[in-house]
Amino acid sequence: YHDAIGFSRQNNVLLNYSYPIQIGNIGRLGLGIGVGIMTYGMNPTWVPPSTLNDPSLPAAGFQAASLDLNFGAYFKGKNFYAGLSSTHLSESEFSSVGVLTTPSTYQSARHYYVMGGYKMKDVAGGNIDANLLVRTDMVKFSADINARYFYVKNNNEIAYGGLTYR
């Protein structure tokens, strides 16, 4: 994927693998890993103000690449599911040292995700799926609470609507 925010450009190529393990009649556990390459660059082309440039921004562009690692585990039971994962395990650091007169660095932050949900069948002619997703980089924290109602006809879910609160 490609992400462009302001002067920054980030490209990631990932290979993910998941291995399912049946846990008796309880459910299925999926363990996954991801390995990839992350590139980060900055091209600060701007019209400078009449005062001095911001010393925290590089005077010219740079590009760097590093290994990126991810991990996840997901368990699915009969009516519930839960997962735990983390991205950017290697917390790669990208630096323009030796390229520019004003060194600039960027470090990817490790992120953690925890999620779980419960499915209720045959509720008012349909199914309800309620779940919670929590994510943090150990600096900021956010959570989503979701509920979806699936309208069922002839054993097929044909329409749904839902609410999310973040």
Image: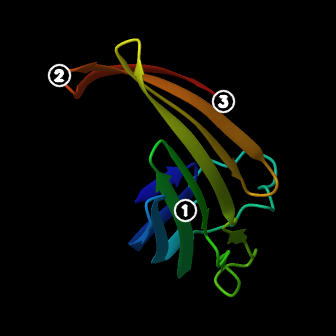
Q: Is residue 34 visible?
A: yes
Q: In the drawing, what numbered circle is on residue 166?
A: 3
The extreme front residue here reads: 25
Around disc 3, counting alpha carbons within 10 Å, would you say few (fewer than 14), some (14 to 19), or many (20 or more)? few
Around disc 1, counting alpha carbons within 10 Å, would you say few (fewer than 14), some (14 to 19), or many (20 or more)? some
Mark 1 touches mark 3? (CB < 8 Å): no
Q: Earlier in the sequence, mark 1 or mark 3?
A: 1
Give the residue number, with chain letter if any, for mark 2: 154
Q: Is residue 65 visible?
A: no
Q: CA distance from mark 1 to mark 3?
A: 33 Å
Residue 161: quadrant of the picture: top left
Q: Measuring 76% from the left and 45% from the top, which residue is drawn there?
A: 141
Q: Measuring 47% from the left and 41% from the top, which residue is drawn there?
A: 79
Q: Measuring 55% from the left and 49% from the top, which residue is drawn there?
A: 5
Q: Is residue 58 left or right of residue 13?
A: right
Q: Is residue 128 left or right of residue 158?
A: right
The extreme left residue here reads: 154
Locate residue 125, reporting x and y percent. Answer: 34, 14
Q: Quadrant of the C terminus?
A: top right
Locate residue 37, reporting x and y percent. Answer: 47, 78
Secondary element at image label 2: loop
Q: Amino acid at mark 1?
A: Asn
Give the residue number, with chain letter if any, for mark 1: 43
Locate residue 133, reporting x and y percent. Answer: 62, 43
Q: Given this view, does label 1 or label 2 mark the residue nearer the observer? A: 2
Q: Is residue 31 left or right of residue 139?
A: left
Q: Quadrant of the N terminus?
A: bottom left
